[in-house]
Image: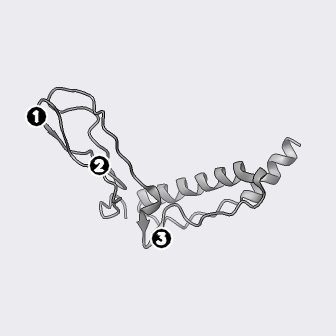
């Protein structure tokens, strides 16, 4: 999987033409391509918009984002967000290094919430 250019976003950046006439191709990255942030001819900065959707990137048929978590009570949004962010980071790190993205342990948001409550009652 390492350096696999087959894992693409449908929102990959498109080439853009500068007013100086130079066609600027996107910069290639593993999961999605970004626009050239400056013109290769006159160095004018890119001022357009671009999007990418990390949620649509799949490795071995599974999303890098993973399963959506149900936080239940509203006061638990922070530990659930931190847990999901850490999990996604592990998935991407593993995919980038040619490992099974899902070989890392899951992060338990309830455990994170309990630790916070004990430390900062």
**Nearer to us: label 3 or label 1:** 1
- Pointers 1 and 2 in contact (CB under 8 A)? no
Disc marking residue 115: none
Q: Dot 1 corresponds to which residue?
A: 21
Decide which of tag 1 and tag 2 comes sooner along the chain: 2
Asked if residue 92 is positioned above or below residue 20 in the image, the reply reads below
Counting from the top left corner in percent of width and height, residue 47 is at 30, 33
Decide which of tag 3 and tag 2 comes sooner along the chain: 2
Residue sticking out furthest to the right: 121
- For image coordinates 24% across by 49% down, the residue present is 14
Question: Element at badge 3?
Answer: strand
- For image coordinates 25% across by 32% down, the residue present is 38
Q: As drawn, is 13 to the left or to the right of 82?
A: left
Q: CA distance from mark 1 to mark 2?
A: 19 Å
Instruction: Specify the quadrant of the image occupied by residue 97.
Output: bottom left
Q: Tell me the crowding category of disc 2: few under 14, some 14 to 19, or many 20 or more residues within 10 angstroms, Cα based.
A: many
Q: Tell me the crowding category of disc 3: few under 14, some 14 to 19, or many 20 or more residues within 10 angstroms, Cα based.
A: some
Residue situated in front as seen by the camera: 6 or 55: 55
Counting from the top left corner in percent of width and height, residue 35 is at 28, 42
Q: CA distance from mark 3 to mark 2?
A: 23 Å
**Nearer to us: label 3 or label 2:** 2
Question: Element at badge 1?
Answer: loop
- For image coordinates 76% across by 53% down, the residue present is 74
Q: Quadrant of the C terminus?
A: top right
Disc marking residue 62: 3
Q: Tell me the crowding category of disc 1: few under 14, some 14 to 19, or many 20 or more residues within 10 angstroms, Cα based.
A: few
Instruction: Specify the quadrant of the image occupied by residue 95.
Output: bottom left
Residue sticking out furthest to the bottom: 61
Decide which of tag 3 and tag 1 comes sooner along the chain: 1
Disc marking residue 13: 2
């Amino acid at each position: 999987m390492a350096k696999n250019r087959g894992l693409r976003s449908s929102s990959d950046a498109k080439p853009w033409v500068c007013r100086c006439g130079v066609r600027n191709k996107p910069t290639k990255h593993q999961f999605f391509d970004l626009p050239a942030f400056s013109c290769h001819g006159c160095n004018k900065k890119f001022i357009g918009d671009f999007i990418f959707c990390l949620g649509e990137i799949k490795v071995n048929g599974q999303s890098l984002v993973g399963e959506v978590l149900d936080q239940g009570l509203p006061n638990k949004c922070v530990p659930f967000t931190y847990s999901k962010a850490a999990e996604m980071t592990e998935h991407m790190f593993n995919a980038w290094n040619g490992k099974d993205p899902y070989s890392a342990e899951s992060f338990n948001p309830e455990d994170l919430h309990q630790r916070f409550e004990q430390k900062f009652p």
